[in-house]
């Protein structure tokens, strides 16, 4: 649950059917078990993790068991939410799946999904590199425990990094949203690629609305040195306009320090 990110896609598998999919709209938070659970899950701890999802009910729900021949090739080897027989895995509450399986599930539900507006799941290679970087920080004897904690939570845009960023960026440059409680602290140079001082540098990031952050994080958009918004392709432009974002768009001037990090984003992250 704690690995979920705003913009991730989640499928609902209940009563032997996949009936809905939704987008994570808030970061995971600690919470008590909802009262409307009643006696269900009586063996669970009362404290757990809450992930809010904006659900869309499928017009054509389907049983994985009836379509297992299409699904089976894409099932994870470990921690699969669906058994090779097509039955659900009762020991698995939330699991990561591949893009291929996600697209297959959307197809079986006769649901057209435009993945230019949201990538389904994080790149496994990036996840591995993130983990390696975290391990490197934890094993570094030259860094205090307090500093290690700040460096690691900066990966999720929190702690000292977010405070430093908010001193530089007061609102979302693309949407104009100023309420920081709804904004994501996004790194321009990805956390996994940074030196430790860059991970906490407020110039290495932007405060972005969640849907804009998803595009920026996945390289679908970037910015020129003079503040022009860049879109990877025409589909991304269409998505922006559906969201009410004008294109072309200039978001204003960046500091010289910000321009260094934005250059990295355009060169190594932007897919346009």
Image (cartoon, rainbow, N blue to C red):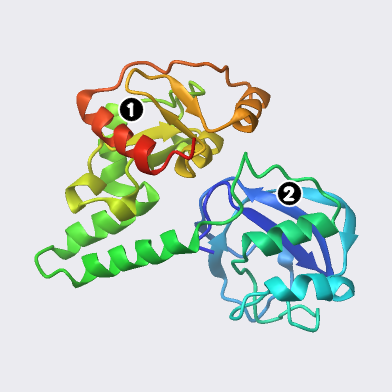
Residue situated furthest left in the rendering? 142
Is 176 situated above or below 82?
above
- Residue at label 1? 169
The picture places residue 125, in percent across and down from the top left corner, at: 44, 63
- In the figure, is residue 174 to the left or right of 102? left
Q: Secondary structure at mark 1?
A: loop
Is 154 situated above or below 66?
above
| Label 2 crowd (10 A; few <14 / some 14-19 / many >=20) | some
- In the figure, is residue 179 to the left or right of 196? right
Q: Are marks 1 and 2 in contact (CB under 8 Å)?
A: no
Marker disc for residue 55 = 2
The picture places residue 113, in percent across and down from the top left corner, at: 74, 45
Q: Nearer the viewer, residue 70 or 214?
A: 70
Estimate the spatial distance between the alpha carbons at disc 1 and disc 2, rounded to whole Å: 31 Å
Q: Secondary structure at mark 2?
A: strand
- In the figure, is residue 66 to the left or right of 23? right
């Amino acid at each position: 649950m704690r690995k979920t990110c705003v913009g991730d896609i989640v499928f609902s598998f209940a009563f032997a059917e996949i009936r809905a999919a939704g987008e994570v709209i808030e970061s995971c938070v600690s919470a008590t078990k909802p009262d409307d659970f009643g006696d269900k899950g009586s063996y669970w701890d009362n404290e757990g993790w809450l992930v809010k999802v904006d659900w869309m009910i499928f017009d054509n729900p389907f049983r994985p068991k009836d379509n297992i021949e299409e699904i089976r090739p894409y099932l994870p080897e470990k921690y699969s939410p669906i058994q090779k027989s097509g039955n659900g895995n009762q020991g698995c509450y939330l699991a990561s799946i591949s893009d291929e399986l996600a697209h297959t599930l959307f197809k079986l539900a006769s649901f057209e999904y435009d993945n230019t507006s949201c990538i389904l799941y994080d790149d496994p290679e990036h996840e591995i590199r993130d983990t390696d970087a975290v391990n490197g920080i934890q094993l570094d004897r030259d860094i205090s425990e307090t500093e290690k904690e700040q460096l690691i939570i900066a990966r999720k845009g929190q702690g000292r990094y977010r405070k430093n960023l908010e001193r530089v960026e007061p609102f979302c440059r693309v949407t104009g949203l100023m309420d920081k409680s709804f904004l994501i602290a996004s790194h321009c140079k990805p956390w996994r690629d940074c030196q430790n001082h860059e991970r906490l540098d407020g110039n290495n990031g932007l405060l972005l609305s969640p849907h804009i952050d998803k595009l920026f994080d996945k390289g679908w958009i970037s910015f020129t040195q003079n503040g022009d918004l860049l879109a990877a392709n025409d589909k991304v432009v269409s998505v922006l306009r559906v969201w009410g974002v004008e294109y072309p768009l200039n978001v204003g001037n960046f500091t010289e320090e910000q321009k260094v990090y934005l250059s990295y984003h355009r060169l190594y992250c932007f897919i346009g």
